[in-house]
Amino acid sequence: MRRRGRPKIRRGARVLGLLCAAAVLAAAAGCGQAVPDGETRNIKIGVSIYDQYDTFIGLLTDRFLRLAREKEEALDTTITILQESAAGSQMDQNAQVEDFIRSGCDVICINIVDRTDASVIIDLAETAEIPVIFFNRELVEEDLERWSKLYYVGAMALQSGRLQGRILIDLCRSDFKKVDRNGDGLLQYVMLEGEAGHQDAIMRTQYSVSTVEAAGYRLERLGDEIANWNRAQADNKMTQFLEAHANAIEVVFSNNDEMALGTIDALHRAGVAPEDWPVVLGIDGTPAALQALQKGEMAGTVLNNALGQAQGMLDLACAVATGSPLPNNLEDGKYIRLPYETITPANVAQYLEAG
């Protein structure tokens, strides 16, 4: 095996690339085609994300790039990654897919803007016979079944809601009076939802509450607002909740960690005494949330395995691009789903150490 230089990452307004120091093969020697023994193959992957400012998606794609660098060395393969952000526009994302096709990508990975509007992407990819891996934002099942070379990498959204609810159940079983500060036997809560119509937001909102109710606890909703996965928006919504309900809020369910952190920002700025803080719950297990959990500002979060999703997406992309056997963890020939994990003060140290 030849010695190869450290891959370079080219960062620009529209393109991120991972390139080997070794020469790239001519375009005719495509990724899915056989190449002579001893030659370096080239895999070109197009990646479009729905929003470059989403913290979790940034974490996932950073880990995807890091794993791709490692895989280059392991396989003696050049991996070129073209990455773009759709900035919340499905039309822009459709155009990006056209660009990926013109650029000769072997596989396209899509963090779709609108899960109900995947038809254009699917039609473009099927016509060009380029496999598509949708990730993190799950499209409608019927669309995924339209073509054999469509895949999804993510997690089961309802599981995250259930685990978030179970964190609250455990806290209630341990010391109900500490959670039910006003002693009325009800848990007064507010909900911060991620995005209107988003599958994960719907499932997390529904199952976090229903799981607690199924365990025999009664809840009273004081407010429910959409904050679009965004810390600043959640800060604003939580400030409004505090102005309307003061210290009556006993629980804050947040569809993700960024909005939970926005809640914490609002609590600090409002000068709420620590003993009067509501139980703040998040989902994702981001580094900032783990720090907040360690400091006692959050009661718990649910790990959305960014590293596992990045690994699954990369392994699947390389397999379909090269015609290699598909990963063993591919379900029904379509899905790679990583389980969520509960993180509380009791086990947060191991997640901090793992990075």
Image (cartoon, helix red, strand yellow):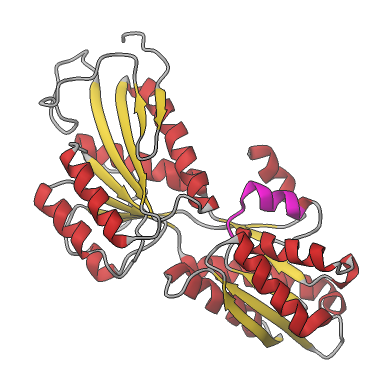
Which residue is rendered at x = 40% and y = 32% of the image? Answer: 68
- In the rendered image, residue 226, in percent from the top left (x then y), is placed at 55, 74
Looking at this rendering, what residue extends furthest in the bottom direction?
184
Question: Residue at coordinates 34% horizontally, 66% vertically from top-left?
Answer: 114
Q: Considering only vertical position in the picture, is 210 above or below 131?
A: below
From this view, report whether residue 261 is shown above or below residue 6: below
Quadrant holding the N terminus: top left
The residue lying toward the viewer, choosing from 14 and 303, is: 14
Residue placed most toward the observer, 13 or 175: 13
Q: Which span is picked out in magenta?
A: 282-293
At x 45%, y 64%, the residue is 156
User: Is 326 positioned to the left or the right of 272 in the image?
Assistant: left
Q: Residue furthest front?
A: 13
User: How many discs mark residues in the rendered view?
Assistant: 0
Side (left or right) of 193 relative to 188: left
**Residue 333 visible here:** no
| Quarter of the image where one finds residue 121 | bottom left
Residue 227: x and y in percent read: 56, 69
Residue 82 sits in which quadrant?
Answer: top left
Q: Position of residue 249 (x, y in %)?
A: 77, 80
**Which residue corresponds to the image point at 78% horizontal and 75% vertical from the top-left?**
172
Q: Position of residue 170 (x, y in %)?
A: 74, 70
On the rendered image, what quadrant is the C terminus found in? Answer: top right
Residue 287 within the magenta-colored segment of the rendering:
yes
Left-right relation of 25 to 156: left
State the residue in front, 117 or 205. 117
